[in-house]
Image: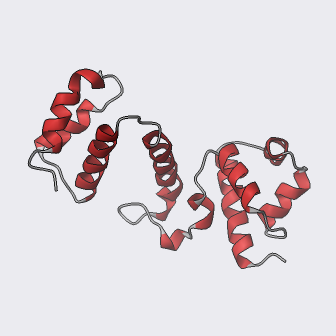
């Protein structure tokens, strides 16, 4: 039997689906369900399984936290809850990309940079290190500089 949590998840599901411009039928087809099942999930009348939630996350390109974390539990920096979906989407992109990085050293550099920025780091060295990570740059030619930054004044 569905409850208030199922209803809250359903509201988030509908909001994400609509934000992507997808119909219930499109999502239902992708999940190999009928449209009524998606409508029942969105209304909170039906509880989805963990497997269905995982599949849904793939279809809607969103992490499970997008549906499971309450708005008042998670707000974007600056305290504007309306930015929650964009922030979670960026976090999901970062999470997926992070695990595709083969180099443990580069993963460490990225984690260090993220932690430093999160602590309010704005040093010229930190900004320069972040610039080296932009996709337009050749990371192989910049790895020595990244190593130096990792051991530099912004490291912990």
**Between residues 9 and 151, which one lies in front from this camera angle?**
151
Residue 128 visible in the snapshot:
no
Spot occupied by residue 73 in the image (x, y as percentages of width and height): 49, 72
Q: Is residue 50 left or right of residue 81?
A: right
Task: Give me the residue at 17% from left, 29% from top.
Answer: 144
Spot occupied by residue 18 in the image (x, y as percentages of width and height): 69, 49
In terms of image quadrants, where is residue 69?
bottom right
Q: How many marks?
A: 0
Q: Is residue 102 left or right of residue 89?
A: left
Task: Give me the residue at 22% from left, 53% from top.
Answer: 116
Spot occupied by residue 152 in the image (x, y as percentages of width and height): 10, 45
The quadrant of the rendering that contains the N terminus is: bottom right
Q: In the rendered view, tell whether residue 116 sits above or below residue 107.
A: below
Task: Give me the residue at 46% from left, 53% from top.
Answer: 87
Q: In the rendered view, tell whether residue 72 sits above or below residue 96.
A: below
Colour style of the rendered protein structure = secondary structure
The quadrant of the rendering that contains the C terminus is: bottom left
Q: In the rendered view, tell whether residue 129 sits above or below residue 56.
A: above
**Between residues 49 and 10, which one lies in front from this camera angle?**
49
Residue 109 visible in the snapshot:
yes
Spot occupied by residue 153 in the image (x, y as percentages of width and height): 8, 49
From this viewpoint, which residue is outermost toward the left?
Answer: 153
């Amino acid at each position: 039997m569905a409850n208030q949590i199922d209803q809250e998840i359903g509201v988030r599901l509908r909001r994400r689906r609509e934000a992507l411009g997808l119909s219930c039928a499109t999502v239902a087809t992708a999940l190999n369900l009928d449209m009524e099942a998606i409508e029942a999930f969105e209304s909170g009348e039906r509880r989805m399984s963990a497997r269905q939630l995982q599949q849904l996350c793939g279809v809607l390109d969103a992490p499970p936290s997008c549906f499971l974390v309450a708005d008042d539990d998670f707000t974007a920096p600056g305290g504007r809850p309306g930015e929650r979906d964009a922030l979670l989407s960026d976090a999901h992109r970062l999470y997926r990309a992070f695990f595709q990085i083969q180099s443990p050293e580069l993963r460490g550099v990225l984690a260090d940079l993220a932690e430093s920025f999160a602590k309010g780091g704005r040093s010229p060295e930190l900004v320069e290190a972040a610039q080296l990570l932009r996709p337009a740059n050749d990371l192989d030619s910049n790895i020595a500089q990244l190593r130096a930054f990792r051991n530099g004044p912004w490291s912990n």
